[in-house]
Image (spheres, rainbow, N blue to C red):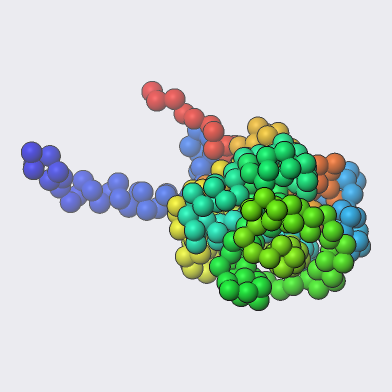
Amino acid sequence: MKHIFQISAGRLVLPLIAALLFSSQLRSQGGTPITKERIEQVLTDAYNKYKDIKEGKNADYIKELAQVDPNIFGIAVVTADGQVFTKGDVTSMVSIQSVSKVFTMAKVIEEQGWQAVMDKIGVDATGMRFNSIVAVEMQKGKEINPLVNPGAIASTSLISGADSAAKWKNIVQIQSDFAGRQLSLNVPVYISEAGDNLRNQAIAHLLYAYGRMYFDPVQSTDIYTKQCALNVNAKDLATMAATLANGGVNPITKKKVVSQTTVMYTLPVMATAGLYDNSGIWLYKTGLPAKSGVGGGLLAVFPGKFGIAVVSPPLDEAGNSVKAQYVIAYVIDQLKLDPYWIEPKK
Ligand code: GLU
């Protein structure tokens, strides 16, 4: 049998070189390579097509968010091999808000394993609003997920650290490792939300009553609120998405942030519950696991290929950035990329 495996070196070298050259190159449906120029062109077209639309409005239930410039509009793509493409304003910061939930969940999966997140929080869509108390009450604190507020506060409570300061340090670290730079707190946003946070406190206490909050509920809610107030720009968010797209290794810093297994269990929750009540519609249109936040950020992951993110504060009724949804769907469509496109075997 041994001879079957004795392929000559020459026959191996050429396919190997070809594989190395093209493995990281993006290809559209049908296999056509996508050039850098093409990506730049599509981002420019998307920017021009959507920059003047006036739909949506800033979140205002957190008072500080209503003050953010609604005209901030930035698009970024970071590929799994670390190429960066940007268009528009990718330096203005917004608070990360719910997008942060993904990375705290990933850290909990990394520390405690996927089974723990399923058992202690849940990984099902609630079918209700992100801050629904009814969703908690109906299932006695079960069958929620880490991307809605109850599950996100429970994730925060599960993060390693003996006290609140240690947990906060670990959260800032994981969010920063995904972004590839040290993220900092937007203090006015934190103060604004912390001063008006009774609903999230109520959610945390209800979970606590059901034995499904794993640290002090007041402190867990406070850490969660701070986590949501970390400042990011479109490039940060695209890098965070690209780290997931690259199997847990940040493609810019090259740091291994989480394991491939953690990524494997993180992306399905994003696909299930990443865009609030419109998660199904989003997945139907783009096929991409994604996460939005009420600060106006939205990131999406093409596994193995790239992360894409848009920052634009005006939101639709469901709480998702209007321009961000248009832009990402447009880019995916124009580049002819959909993870569910399948070439039948000849
Ligand atoms: N900090 C926000 C809240 O808990 C996050 C909401 C969001 O982005 O969905 O209400």
Taking the image as shown, residue 225 lies to the left or right of residue 15, namely right
Taking the image as shown, residue 166 lies to the left or right of residue 73, namely left
The quarter of the image holding the C terminus is top left
* Relative height, residue 65 to residue 45 (above, below): below
Q: Residue at x 40, y 53 (%)?
A: 21
The quarter of the image holding the N terminus is top left
Residue 313 location (% of width, % of height): 83, 54
Taking the image as shown, residue 296 lies to the left or right of residue 182, namely right
Taking the image as shown, residue 169 lies to the left or right of residue 255, namely right
Q: Nearer the viewer, residue 65 or 24?
A: 65
Q: Residue at x 64, y 53 (%)?
A: 211
Rendering quarter of residue 7: top left
Residue 168 location (% of width, % of height): 65, 71
Q: Which residue lies most toward the bottom here?
A: 165
Q: Residue at x 87, y 53 (%)?
A: 59
* Relative height, residue 146 to residue 160 (above, below): above
Residue 195 location (% of width, % of height): 87, 67
Q: Nearer the viewer, residue 318 or 45?
A: 318
Q: Report if residue 302 is visible in the image.
A: no
Q: Nearer the viewer, residue 68 or 222?
A: 222
Residue 187 location (% of width, % of height): 81, 73
